[in-house]
């Protein structure tokens, strides 16, 4: 009995890797902002690390997420093609 892996599984693993990497980069960016930027109130009366980490970094990553979703994540069918053909033939 041959086991043929569904090609959607390979795509799902690729998307999982992309999502995990994106989330890790987001957390690293937040940690770097809080560690490297100063504590003096500069932007909107907030400390710079807080303003950048909670206002600017999320906006940048939302824009990046839109680009990643459009360019790197394929649109795949979630239904089996065999089942659709069987239903059409009935």
Image: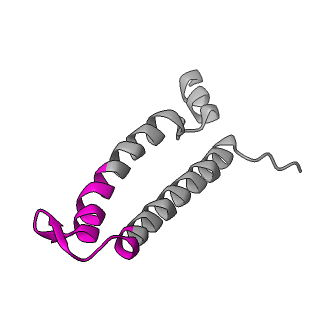
| Residue sitting at x 49%, y 56% | 22
Q: Could you tell me residue 37's position as x and y percent? A: 33, 70
Asked whether the viewer can see residue 75, the reply is no
Q: Could you tell me residue 26's position as x and y percent? A: 43, 61
Q: Quadrant of the C terminus?
A: top right
Magenta-span inclusion, residue 41: yes
Left or right side of 11 for 30: left
| Residues drawn in magenta | 33-59
Left or right side of 52 for 61: right
- Residue placed furthest toward the right: 1
Query: Quick one: 20 or 74, which is closer to the camera?
Result: 20
Asked whether the viewer can see residue 57, the reply is yes
Magenta-span inclusion, residue 61: no
| Residue sitting at x 43%, y 63% | 29
Left or right side of 48 for 68: right
Q: Quadrant of residue 40?
A: bottom left
Query: Quick one: 31 or 8, which is closer to the camera?
Result: 31
């Amino acid at each position: 009995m041959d086991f043929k892996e569904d090609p959607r599984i390979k795509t799902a693993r690729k998307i999982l890797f992309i999502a995990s990497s994106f989330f890790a980069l987001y957390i690293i960016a937040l940690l770097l902002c809080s560690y490297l930027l100063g504590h003096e109130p500069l932007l909107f009366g907030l400390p710079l690390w807080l303003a950048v980490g909670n206002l600017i970094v999320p906006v940048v990553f939302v824009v990046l997420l839109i680009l990643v979703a459009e360019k790197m994540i394929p649109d795949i069918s979630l239904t089996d093609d065999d089942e659709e053909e069987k239903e059409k033939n009935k």
